Amino acid sequence: MRSRSVAAVVSALALALPASAMASGGNGQAQVGIQLAETAQTAQSQAEAEQHAANANAPVNTAGGSVTGGANNANQTAGNGATSGPAANNAATTQNNNQTQNAGSSSCAVGCGGNGQAQVSAQLANTEQEAESEAEATQNAVNANAPVNVAGGSVTGGANNANQTAGNGATSGPASNTASTTQTDPQTQNAGSSSCLAGCSGNGQAQLSGQLAHTEQEAASSAEAKQNAVNANVPVNIAGGSVTGGANNANQTAGNGATSGPAGNRAATTQTNTQTQNGGSSSCLAGCGGNGQAQLSGQLSETGQTAGSSAQANQNAVNANVPVNIAGGSVTGGANNANQTAGNGATSGPASNTAATTQTNTQMQNGGSSSCVVGCGGNGQAQLSGQAACTTQAAESSAEAEQNAVNANVPVNIAGGSITGGANNANQTAGNVATSGPATNSAATTQNNTQTQV
């Protein structure tokens, strides 16, 4: 489809020229240059952070009896951050079209046809870039001492000296696109002088060139971190009896991070078309045919790149001392001195695409001199060149880490009797890491076409 587009552009330009401009009698020169550059860029960076942190000491008494809540000396530090790196597009399109025509002098006398020269060049560069960077962090941190008494009896809550540090961060690296398209089309024609006498036809030269470069790039980087950390001492008494909760000195550190590396696309397309024609001098006398030269070149380059990097980390860490008494009897919970450290991280390495396409077409024609005398036919030369380069790349890197860490001392009494929970001095360290290495595509396409006619 792209090659048809190039052919259609070149054909339309050729047909648009009058017949007298294409290698006709009399020194006729025509140059048509059309350049079209279209660049579309979209860069988006978004960060969203949601946090709900509660640090409460809430003794409740629904019916008679007494509720005494121990001192709540808990320290709660909740950090929630969402950072979205820069999303950048950098597109540079350069189109150069140099056309030079030089019709040499003629010493012809009586009825000589002149040199005809025509140059047609069309260049089209279309660049589309889209870069997105997104980070989302959601956190719910609860640090509570909540003794509850629904009916008579007493509930005494031990001191809650728990330290809770919850850190939740989502970082999305930069998503960047860099596209550089360069199209250069120099055309040179030189029709040499003629010393023909009486009825000589001149040299005819024609050059057609079409270049099309289409580049599409998409880079996306996203990071999402969700965390729910609970550190609680909750003695509950539904009906008579007593519940005594031991001191909750648990330390809980929950770290949850999702990092998505940069996703980058780099596409460089260079198209160079050099055409040179030189119609040599002629010493023919009487009725000599001139040299005919024609050059046609078409270049097509299409590059498509997609790079995606994503990281997701989900964590639910619970550190609790929860003695419960449904009916009479007593429940005594031992001291909960458990230390819990839960680290959850998902890291997705950078996904990058690097595509370099180079197309070079050099055509040179030289119509030599002629010493023919009387009724000589001229030289005919034709050059046709077509180049097509298509590069498609897809690189994807993803990492997902899910963790559920629970460290609990939970004595439960459904009916009469007593339950005594021993001290919970357990140390729990849970580390969960998912790392996805970089996914990289490197494509290099080089096409060289050199044609020489003498």
Image (cartoon, rainbow, N blue to C red):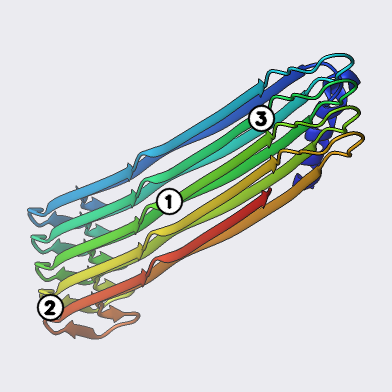
| Quarter-of-image position of residue 242 | bottom left
Does the image show residue 152?
A: no
Residue position for label 3: 189
The crowd level at tag 2 (other Cα within 10 Å; few <14, some 14-19, many 20+) is many
| Quarter-of-image position of residue 143 | bottom left
Q: Earlier in the sequence, mark 2 or mark 1?
A: 1
Q: Position of residue 14 (x, y in %)?
A: 83, 28
Please say if 232 is above or below 372: below
Q: Where is residue 448 in the image (x, y as percent from the top left)?
A: 59, 55
Classify mark 3: helix, strand or loop: strand
Which of 134/233 is in front?
134
In the picture, measured across the screen, residue 407 lies left or right of residue 28, that is left
Residue 334, disc: 2
Residue position for label 1: 264
Q: Which of marks 1 and 3 is nearer the N terminus?
A: 3
Residue at point 22% right, 54% down? 167
Q: Residue furthest top?
A: 110
